């Protein structure tokens, strides 16, 4: 069950031309309490009508619009009469499709760029005459289409923004969605509210009310099970479903042996005691470890774990329901899970999330995924609205496949115990240093296939390294490495190498996302 938010809300479709920031654009729209969704540039005018779109945003992209194989759009989309806003590549595509001209510049513009407003306009209302924008281009619009007016310029780009109120077409050369662009959110707000006249009706309370109503209507008096991991996603999903159907919901906690220290106790103490939801704990360690034996390839690990989760749920239902059939399984799938698994926007598979690309083909359950179209920050706000404690809502994300994807190498008892001990030390020291609220998460990665020479107690050692991956983020679609104080890193390194003899080296990963993902596998 994927909830259809197109029926009751204003809908903005973000057409993805291969942009680094397509997800960020969608999030910025939702921050203005307007529903947005990412779609591929292959979408047709007919498909846009079926989605009941009220406005469209063309994203940026890495290509040049005049190249023979450049991404294009169904030209009939312009005939729908919907307001369209182009960003960077999207801005240039509108110009090209409306018989303007796009050319390569002698000088590129990258990064913060002084920009000047040249005339009054709906799009740049409440934006000062001079401001800084974030540019990333070598091409520019060099000739306006008919019925358009230029409304901004830079030193290198004479047409840095334009609009045509008659055609409902608008665009900017810069990236208003990134925080480096001054008044970027003002520009998006102007397009959505003043140019497109949309309603700000996408709220936490409306999301909860509609999800609860749809679950009640669909499920009726049937029994439902939910995979509960202890993280915020499954906790919020379970709470929404519990609000809809009460004791017809049974949560299943799969102890697959890949958990962090004290994980099961936290689920029981923090979540069950608060919500009074029915919970069954399944010990499935042997089955998971048996299927993972000898497996080294990350995608294969994820798919095995995804399939084994379903098998465990199937076994659990036999005990819960005395062998009568359970139709529905609740999952805490998020929109980034769908996007990174190759769904939702026609993009490449970055990694198969166990609850999306890892599901078996012979799945016997119908899925209930009330969070499937939501970003992590939206889920957290909904969790607070539902009354969940901050300890659950703001818990650092932890992957469904658990510590298995934090081991570069084979998943076995020995390697799991090493990374579990190291993870606990890191979490303890970060908590003592009051860093929990300053970072998004800190995966601790064991390089089980790597050994390095060390010296401990005047003796040669040949141990494993671990990698610390502290990051800051808002939704996990993009991330930067967290600047952890050196004294905290020193204490972590000292404790890890003192308390875990098999580990003799601690490494810090300072890669942003992109190009690196947050998890190593």
Image (spheres, rainbow, N blue to C red):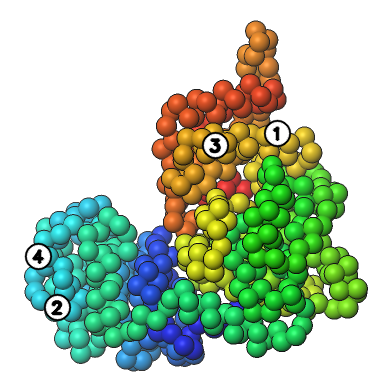
Question: Residue at horizontal 16%, vertical 86%?
Answer: 147
Q: Nearer the viewer, residue 29 or 132?
A: 29
How much space separates mark 1 and mark 2, taking CA atoms?
61 Å
Q: Classify residue 74 by image quadrant.
A: bottom left
Q: Of helix, strand and loop, which one carries label 2? A: loop
Q: Nearer the viewer, residue 102 or 50?
A: 50
Which is more foreground, mark 1 or mark 2? 1
The span from disc 1 to disc 3 (Cα, nearest Å) is 14 Å
Q: Which residue is mark 2?
A: 121
Where residue 61 appears, as percent x and y from the top left, is 37, 64
Instruction: From the image, tell me which residue sits under label 1.
Output: 418
Residue pointed to by mark 3 = 468
Task: Kindly identify the residue that appears in the image at 86 percent across and 74 percent down.
Answer: 321
What percent of the width, then of the height, locates residue 223?
77, 78
The residue pinned by badge 4 equals: 129
Q: Earlier in the sequence, mark 4 or mark 3?
A: 4
What residue is shown at x 53% (from left), y 81% (from top)? 209
Closer to viewer: mark 1 or mark 4: 1
Q: Which sits earlier in the primary sequence, circle 1 or circle 4? A: 4
Residue extending farthest top? 458
Of the numbered discs 1 and 3, the one sitting upstream in the chain is: 1
Q: Marks 3 and 2, Cα distance to the nearest angstrom?
A: 49 Å
Considering only order in the chain, which callout, 4 or 2, is on the residue closer to the N terminus? 2
Pick whichever of labels 1 and 2 is earlier in the sequence: 2
Give neighbour class at mark 3: few <14, some 14-19, many 20+ (Cα, 10 Å).
many
Give x and y (percent) for residue 304: 76, 56
Residue 70 visible in image: no
Whole-Å distance between the Cαs marked 1 and 4? 58 Å
Residue located 61% across and 85% down the image: 214
């Amino acid at each position: 069950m994927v909830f259809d938010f197109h029926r009751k809300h204003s809908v903005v479709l973000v057409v993805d031309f291969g942009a680094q920031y397509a997800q960020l654009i969608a999030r910025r729209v939702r921050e203005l309490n307007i529903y947005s969704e990412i779609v591929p540039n292959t979408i047709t005018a007919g498909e846009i009508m079926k989605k009941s779109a009220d406005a469209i945003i063309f994203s940026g992209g890495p290509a040049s619009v005049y190249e023979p194989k450049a991404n294009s759009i169904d030209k009939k989309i312009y005939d729908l009469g919907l307001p369209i806003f182009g960003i960077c590549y999207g801005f240039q595509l509108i110009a090209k499709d409306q018989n303007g001209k796009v050319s390569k510049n002698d000088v590129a513009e990258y990064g913060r760029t002084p920009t000047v407003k040249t005339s009054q306009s709906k799009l740049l209302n409440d934006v000062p005459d001079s401001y800084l924008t974030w540019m990333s281009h070598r091409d520019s619009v060099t000739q306006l289409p008919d019925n358009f007016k230029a409304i901004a310029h830079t030193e290198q780009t004479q047409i840095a923004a334009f609009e045509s109120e008659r055609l409902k077409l608008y665009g900017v050369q810069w990236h208003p969605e990134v925080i480096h662009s001054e008044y970027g959110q003002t520009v998006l707000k102007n397009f959505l509210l003043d140019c497109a006249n949309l309603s700000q009706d996408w709220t936490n309370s409306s999301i909860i009310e509609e999800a609860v109503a749809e679950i009640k209507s669909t499920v009726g008096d049937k029994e439902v099970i939910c995979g509960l991991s202890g993280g915020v996603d499954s906790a919020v999903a379970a709470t929404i479903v519990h609000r809809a159907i009460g004791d017809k919901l049974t949560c299943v906690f799969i102890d697959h042996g890949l958990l962090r220290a004290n994980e099961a106790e936290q689920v029981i103490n923090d979540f069950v005691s608060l919500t009074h939801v029915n919970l069954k704990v399944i010990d499935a360690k042997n089955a998971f470890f048996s299927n993972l034996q000898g497996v080294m390839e990350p995608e294969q690990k994820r798919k095995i774990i995804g399939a084994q989760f379903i098998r465990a749920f199937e076994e659990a239902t036999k005990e819960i329901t005395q062998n009568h059939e359970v139709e529905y399984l609740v999952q805490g799938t998020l929109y980034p899970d769908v996007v990174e698994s190759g769904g939702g926007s026609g993009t490449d598979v970055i990694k198969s999330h166990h609850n999306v690309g890892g599901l078996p083909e012979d799945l016997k359950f119908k899925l209930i995924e009330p969070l499937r179209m939501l970003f992590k920050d939206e889920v957290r706000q909904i969790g607070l609205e539902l009354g969940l404690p901050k300890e659950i809502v703001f818990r650092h994300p932890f992957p469904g496949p658990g510590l298995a994807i934090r081991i570069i190498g084979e998943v076995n008892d020995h390697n799991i115990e090493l990374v579990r001990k190291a993870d606990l030390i890191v979490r303890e020291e970060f908590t003592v240093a009051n860093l929990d609220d300053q970072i998004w998460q800190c995966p601790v990665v064991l390089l089980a296939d790597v050994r390095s020479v060390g010296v401990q107690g005047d003796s040669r050692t040949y141990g494993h390294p671990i990698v610390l991956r502290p990051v800051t983020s808002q939704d996990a679609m993009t991330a930067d490495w967290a600047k952890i104080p050196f004294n905290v890193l020193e204490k972590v390194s000292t404790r890890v190498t003192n308390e875990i003899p098999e580990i003799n080296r601690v490494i810090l990963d300072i890669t942003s996302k992109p190009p690196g993902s947050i998890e190593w596998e």
